[in-house]
Image (spheres, rainbow, N blue to C red):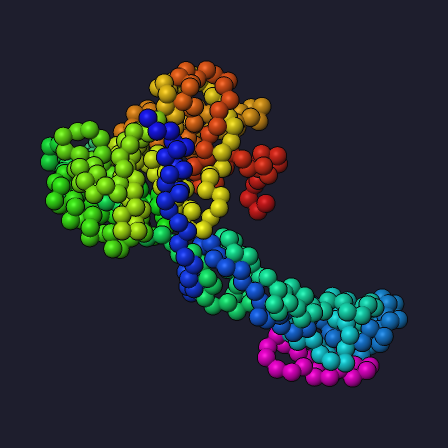
Amino acid sequence: MKTVDEHLADILDAVGVLPARRVPLTEAHGCVLGADVRATVAVPGFDNSAMDGYAVRAADIEKASEDNPVTLPVAGEIAAAAGTPPFVEPGTAVRIMTGAPFPPGADTVVQVEWTDGGTQTVAIHRPARRGLHIRRAGEDITPGSLVLPAGTLLGSTQIGLLAAVNVARPPVHPRPRVVVLATGSELVDLGERLQPGQIVDSNSHAVAAAAREAGADAIRLTGVPDDAAQFEARFREVLGQADVVVTTGGVSVGAHDVVKEVLSAGGQVRFESIAMQPGRPQGFGVVDGVAVFTLPGNPVSALVSFEVFVRPALLKMRGHTNLNRQAVTVTVGEPMTSPPARRSFLRVRVSRGQDGSLVATSAGGQGSHQLSAAASANALLVVPEDVTAVEVGKPLTAILLSSDPADNVLGALTAAAGAPGPGQ
Ligand code: AMP
Ligand code: MG
């Protein structure tokens, strides 16, 4: 049997990073930058005020104090808007708002709190040093400087920064287009009435959702029967619309495992037994430039296989270099078993014990059809190939899966400070 690591290495060798292209900024959110972005402008673009207050000359208010305020005539007002600010004559003040262009003639901003706030004349009761509260042009970004390097994941702050430097179409690695094809003659789509022996297709929903969670655009096709000709037709059809095709079902050794039958005939997809549980039968290959993953049909097997093999491939295609989830060392809170010579991925709940350490307990039934236990897990416990009996207290690696804040077992801030109350 092939090891998990060998199989993953083969997959990652075979898939490439999707070439970067320019997309509208809104679409770029959640993508990885494909090239360095340099500034063509300065930010701030012009000297401006960091405070609501008055633009004055520092020398004119040098002697200002609470007891002896300096009173200056207010010669005008500058709002945060377009236009050229007026010259500030010696011995005068101009009202200025935050973000408004800083006027020539003045050399400092006195914040409104240090004055009486007057509109005809203003009494200033504290001196201000030259340059106070002036945001200088280029103080954040200078033209030509590196704004964000290639490889940066564009979250909200990075999107804001790109907008600030007026980049309308950043170059990003596109989201992989994933088509999920659920096969099995027993499958019906959501909401349909079930005849004896039929089941609702859950895999196509779950795998497409997992692909979206991995940053892909995913669509799902359901109800492809266990019929070689029909499967082949659907498969050929979707090849042209996808970067990745993920099938579920039909890859074990049953009499009607048509995915394996059809795709092994083509020769590009290899079907192998991987030393893991769940998810032993796996197929992978590249067909007409499209990465094809054939996952087993049992719902938990399909999802674990996706997690272990498809997700890292999607992250690579999206331009990520770290393809791993957060993994932590946990101790096991109850005895567990694992088959010999296979790496198990047990569905567990990881929580913080009384002593602050991380403890894993089983999330429930570990059968590869038992989706409800998987749905209550927040981690996969990795039991190495050479371990068959896991005793209480044994340290093992757990892969953290959940993005639910309630599952944030690492939460250093809340763990240290106690659960924050409202308003904190
Ligand atoms: P297979 O890999 O086709 O032998 O299927 C293994 C098990 O998974 C069988 O019990 C199937 O009924 C079940 N199964 C296959 N495809 C799906 C699916 N799309 N949704 C839910 N269960 C499935
Ligand atoms: Mg089947």
Residue 315: percent from left, percent from top:
42, 46
Residue at 13% in and 45% down = 230
Quadrant housing residue 164 = bottom right
Residue 307 visible? The answer is: no
- Judging depth in this view, the residue of 124 and 239 nearest the camera is 239
Residue 200: percent from left, percent from top:
20, 38
Residue 327 visible? The answer is: yes
Residue 292: percent from left, percent from top:
29, 44
Compared to residue 340, the image places residue 404 above or below, namely: below
Compared to residue 137, the image places residue 242 above or below, namely: above
Residue at 71% in and 79% down = 103
**Residue 84 painted magenta:** yes
Total numbered labels placed on residues in the image? 0
The span shown in magenta is: 76-93
Residue 229: percent from left, percent from top:
12, 44
Residue 104 appears left or right of 155: right
Give the main secondary structure of the magenta stretch.
loop
Quadrant housing residue 172 = bottom left
Quadrant housing residue 76 = bottom right
Residue 92 appears left or right of 392: right
- Judging depth in this view, the residue of 310 and 406 nearest the camera is 310
